[in-house]
Amino acid sequence: MAKVVCVLYDDPVDGYPTAYARDGLPKLEHYPGGQTLPSPKAIDFQPGVLLGSVSGALGLRKFLESQGHSLVVTSDKDGPDSVFERELVDADIVISQPFWPAYLTAERIAKAGKLKLAITAGIGSDHVDLQAAIERGITVAEVTYCNSISVSEHVVMMILSLARNYIPSYEWVVKGGWNIADCVARSYDIEGMDIGTVGAGRIGTAVLRRLKPFDVKLHYTDRHRLPDAVEKELGVTFHKTAGEMVPVCDVVTINAPLHPETENLFDEAMIAKMKRGAYLVNTARGKICNRDTIARALESGQLAGYAGDVWFPQPAPKDHPWRSMPHHGMTPHISGSSLSAQTRYAAGTREILECWFEGRPIREEYLIVAGGKLAGAGAHSYSAGDATRGSEEAARFKT
């Protein structure tokens, strides 16, 4: 029997919900491109309920405990005295979400002698030291595509929010004002703008498709070029590198995985190449952007706005400069954790567990590391290495 340690974010401050704003979810049959949705043998939850917090337990408790497995669910993940650190020592399986990541550093993996499987309930497994997992023969899997569309919708929302100066305008209403001039002094249409994505995988391509009807000029860079037919359909221009693309863009959106090649990609030199007054949106990973460079660029006016919901570490310390810098539209990491997305990634997590316990192959598209090497989606998207360095700073956020 296996010991499963599941790290999830805290319940709402007012307690776990007893009712919801909507009564259900639209039924989807497949993802764009035809990939089927997660297909576990059964689920023990109602689609549309809160599953990603501690009390939701990803809907896994009945399934696991009925088979004799033990399940530990905690939000306490950072620091040597955390519940996660204590329970990890004899854990067989670790489940974590990118929004509240249980950082599996090389040091933690070395302490976890029984660990065989690390599952990301969502997409993006950079909170695992992939090189250490490769060397230890640990399987790393994630629920590929489960929240890609969720994130792409969030990206479009953030682009429009920055350009149209939505958040400050909303705040004037809350304060009782009718300050139209203050609102529109930083408000622009995106029609006719050049908008580029760094990364054109599932999320980046979905962003491009959603932006095309706005009559903008689209650009992308990716180490895997899109098929000619897709480029023509979207009217999108390919650039070999981010450095070649950003000088022509009014808006840049980052939709690439974090690995050693993309870490700190948007540093001072890259930001200097961007148009003065460009907008930057990052729903990929916080470490792709240099923290202090972003804050300085907003203060100087080199960037007109920065929005994103990814930070490093997560949760971000209370004195993180992205909380207080001007002209930002930051949220906690929520773009891929809508109730709609939670239904899919919880089901996908159960599918992975069913395969693991029954000795069946995990879907190839769900694999990141397997058999001591990058595999599946991991071989396509990642480079071997470690992006967890510095994650201990997350402990500063604890009260």
Image (tube, rainbow, N blue to C red):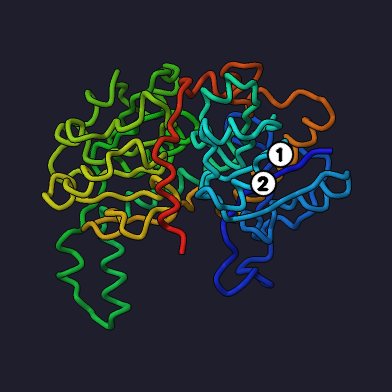
Residue for point 40% across, 55% down? 396
Q: Are marks 1 and 2 in contact (CB under 8 Å)?
A: yes
Q: Taking 11 as reference, is 355 left or right? A: right
Q: Amino acid at mark 2?
A: Glu
Relative to 149, say whether 134 is above or below: above
Q: Where residue 201 appears, x then y in whole percent?
A: 47, 28
Q: What crowding class fits label 2: few (fewer than 14 Cα within 10 Å), some (14-19), or many (20 or more)?
A: some
Q: Taking 207 as reference, is 122 left or right? A: right
Q: Taking 75 as reference, is 43 left or right? A: right
Give the CA separation, mark 1 to mark 2: 7 Å
Q: What crowding class fits label 1: few (fewer than 14 Cα within 10 Å), some (14-19), or many (20 or more)?
A: some
Q: Nearer the viewer, residue 150 or 350?
A: 350
Residue for point 22% across, 31% down? 246
Q: Where residue 318 appears, x then y in whole percent?
A: 36, 60
Q: Nearer the viewer, residue 11 or 372?
A: 372
Q: Where residue 387 appears, x then y in whole percent?
A: 43, 32
Answer whether residue 155 is visible to the viewer in this image.
no
Residue for point 63% across, 47% down? 86
Relative to 276, say whether 34 is above or below: above
Q: Nearer the viewer, residue 288 or 344?
A: 288
Q: Amino acid at mark 1?
A: Asp
Q: Where residue 334 appears, x then y in whole percent?
A: 48, 53
Q: Which residue corresponds to mark 2? A: 87
Quadrant in the rendering for residue 240: top left
Residue for point 65% across, 26% down? 139
Q: Which mark is residue 116?
A: none
Residue at disc 1, secondary structure: loop
Relative to 399, say whether 71 is above or below: above
The image quadrant where one finds the N terminus is top right
Answer whether residue 383 is visible to the viewer in this image.
yes
Q: Which residue corresponds to mark 1? A: 90
Q: Nearer the viewer, residue 350 or 396?
A: 396
